[in-house]
Image (cartoon, helix red, strand yellow):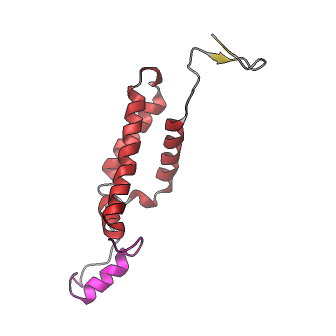
């Protein structure tokens, strides 16, 4: 079990009082998403964060590998999620709202089904597909 979300600094004060953490060091928040999740939420939180990033990376690459869906959005999501997973090693990305918006967009994009291929259009008057 971890110390609870947002309680890392408070727990450092406890460790300092017990002389398990050097008094001269400042109480900084964890700078790694992975180690921060492990410290604050325990093994379950760590595995959840890793699972979310792995799931989004995997979905992006699977969508990219499909023959009929190689577009700039798929390539962009695949590259961005690899970059985010690497950045999370030394930066706590959990507080960056733009990443959560990106995660939501990617989840929506990857769950979209029945997209209209580029060679087909929609006839607005009859609502049928034509080539």
Q: At which x and y percent is residue 81?
A: 39, 43
Can residue 23 be seen here? The reply is yes
Q: Does the magenta stretch include residue 3?
A: yes
Q: Image quadrant of residue 113?
A: top right
Q: Hey, which residue is sitting farthest right in the picture?
A: 125
Q: Tell me: residue 89, above or below residue 106.
A: below
Q: Does the magenta stretch include residue 19?
A: yes
Q: Which residue is drawn at 37% across and 33% down?
A: 61
Can residue 79 be seen here? The reply is no
Q: Tell me: residue 14, above or below residue 88.
A: below
Q: At which x and y percent is residue 107?
A: 50, 42
- Report the number of numbered marks: 0
Q: At which x and y percent is residue 73?
A: 48, 32
The part of the chain drawn in magenta is: 1-23
Q: Which residue is drawn at 49% across and 36% down?
A: 110
Q: Which residue is drawn at 61% across and 15% down?
A: 120
Q: Hey, which residue is sitting farthest top in the picture?
A: 131
Q: Tell me: residue 86, above or below residue 130.
A: below
Screen quadrant of the N terminus:
bottom left
116 relative to 77 in the view: left or right: right
Q: Which residue is drawn at 34% across and 62% down?
A: 44
Q: At which x and y percent is residue 33?
A: 34, 59
Q: Tell me: residue 10, above or below residue 78.
A: below
> Foreground residue, 36 or 58?
58
Q: Image quadrant of residue 67?
A: top left
Screen quadrant of the C terminus:
top right
Q: Image quadrant of residue 122?
A: top right
């Amino acid at each position: 079990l971890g110390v609870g979300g947002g309680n890392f600094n408070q727990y450092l004060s406890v460790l300092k009082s017990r002389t398990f953490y050097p008094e001269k060091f400042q109480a900084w928040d964890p700078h790694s998403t992975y180690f921060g999740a492990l410290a604050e939420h325990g093994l379950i939180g760590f595995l959840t964060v890793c699972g979310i990033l792995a799931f989004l990376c995997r979905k992006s690459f699977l969508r990219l590998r499909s023959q009929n869906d190689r577009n700039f959005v798929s390539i962009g999501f695949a590259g961005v999620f690899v970059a985010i997973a690497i950045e999370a090693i030394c930066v706590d990305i959990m507080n960056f709202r733009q990443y959560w918006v990106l995660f939501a967009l990617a989840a929506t994009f990857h769950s979209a089904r029945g997209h209209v291929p580029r060679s087909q259009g929609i006839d607005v008057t009859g609502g049928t597909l034509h080539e």
